[in-house]
Amino acid sequence: MKSFYMYEDQQRCFIKSLQSCFVGEVCRIENDESGEELLDLLGGIDQIEDNSSDILTIYCVLTMNCNLGCSYCFEKDKPRKDCVLSKEKIVDGISTIISSKNATSINVVFTGGEPLLKYDSLKYIVECLNTKYGEKCGYGLITNGTVLDEQKIEFFSKNKFSLQISIDGNRPVHDSIRKYVNDNKGSYDLILNNLGKIYKFGYDLGVAIRFNLGNRNYDFDSAFEAISKFKDVNNIETVIYPGFLSVNPNDEMYVDLNQQKAIIRAFLESAAKYNLNTIDRWNNAEMCMFKNKSGITIGADGMLYKCYSIVGDANYVIGKLSDYTDDCMVGSGSLCELSNCFYSNICYGGCPYNTYITNGKMDRDCQYELIDYINKAIFITELGKLVNLSFEEAISSIKKLMVD
């Protein structure tokens, strides 16, 4: 089933596909009281070919050590140790995984802890994989952004990395959360400075700036204004995106549904104000690694997992890297049994790590009302001045259509 939004007023009618994220205007169809002609029209708008199983994704946790001590980090209670495997063993293990899959492309993502504390190992692994697989391999990096320099940026540019860097709102909020372990000082200014280096020295990069959202994040203007000064030059593509923190309800950073809605609205309105590119859909984990059969995580302990957020939990070890078999790649499949749900084919039961946080089990995480609000808010923001209603009125007027 395909899912579409429709927003119309007396003059115009706009639709959005929740699969392809195509947004466009459609002509009104006269004498179509049943709506069948409109549904036929929508059914032919986007024919999506699912090739996700042809893309192999390998997350590599180079270290559990980190120079920051973020209050909400999912690794904060785990030993801060480097990977027990040598860089040569990691290359051998990745090669074994690749040889077992008939993938058209390979995406290797380095994470931690702070993976750039093991930059020499990262560089060695990339160079070895390039020699063996050439352009078939693509690379990603999840970093806190504090230890970037011109040399590293040059290497990432040469190898066309996608970088993810986290900022937690404006300077006071960020610095109260993302502090250095050794002196308890904030990291906001250094991260913004290093972002500037990316745009000064980098090229052929993807840059995703993740804003971790909790109950202190309502003012984004100062951070977004600073980011807006970094121009997308030298084929650097930038996107900012929101990520709600996975924390227990009794955590000081927890936000309830009404707070989430208010934060998202503030986020999208501020992004539009500063003309920043943001997400065109919020899918609450989609067909993530835990669910699919084309992704795996190599933990710093040398073990294999189906989610990098649960590295170190012996209950979710699926094997050793040295003993890898194809069975290690098998995921849970969709966690949602509601095939007629409007959002089932973009969320597949949500992010299981959210339930893990509350009860220790990776399970279905239905957030229907939130995914409904966020995606409608994105659609209204995309339409911008074409909408002549208030924000909340416009959201409530959106119709949902499902097409075979």
Image (tube, helix red, strand yellow):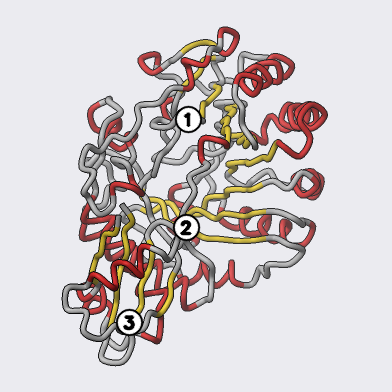
Q: What residue type is labelled 1?
A: Tyr
Q: How many labels does the image show?
A: 3
Picture coordinates of residue 47 (x, y %)? 46, 57
The residue at 23%/69% (across/down) is: 36
Mark earlier in primary sequence (1, 2): 2
Residue 56 can be seen in this image = yes
Residue 66 can be seen in this image = no
The residue at 53%/21% (across/down) is: 299
Give left or right: position of 390 versus 151.
left
Mark earlier in primary sequence (3, 2): 3
Q: What residue type is labelled 3?
A: Cys
Q: What residue type is labelled 2?
A: Tyr
Q: How far apart are marks 1 and 2 (CA)?
A: 20 Å
Residue 308 tag number: 1
- Tell me if residue 186 comes above or below residue 352 in the rendering: below
Of residues 100 and 37, the one drawn nearer to the viewer in this rendering: 37
Which mark's residue is nearer the viewer, 3 or 1? 3
Q: Mark 1 and mark 3 in contact (Cβ < 8 Å)?
A: no
Residue 241 tag number: 2
The residue at 36%/73% (across/down) is: 15
Residue 13 tag number: 3
Q: Quadrant of the C terminus?
A: bottom left
Of residues 339 and 349, the one drawn nearer to the viewer in this rendering: 339
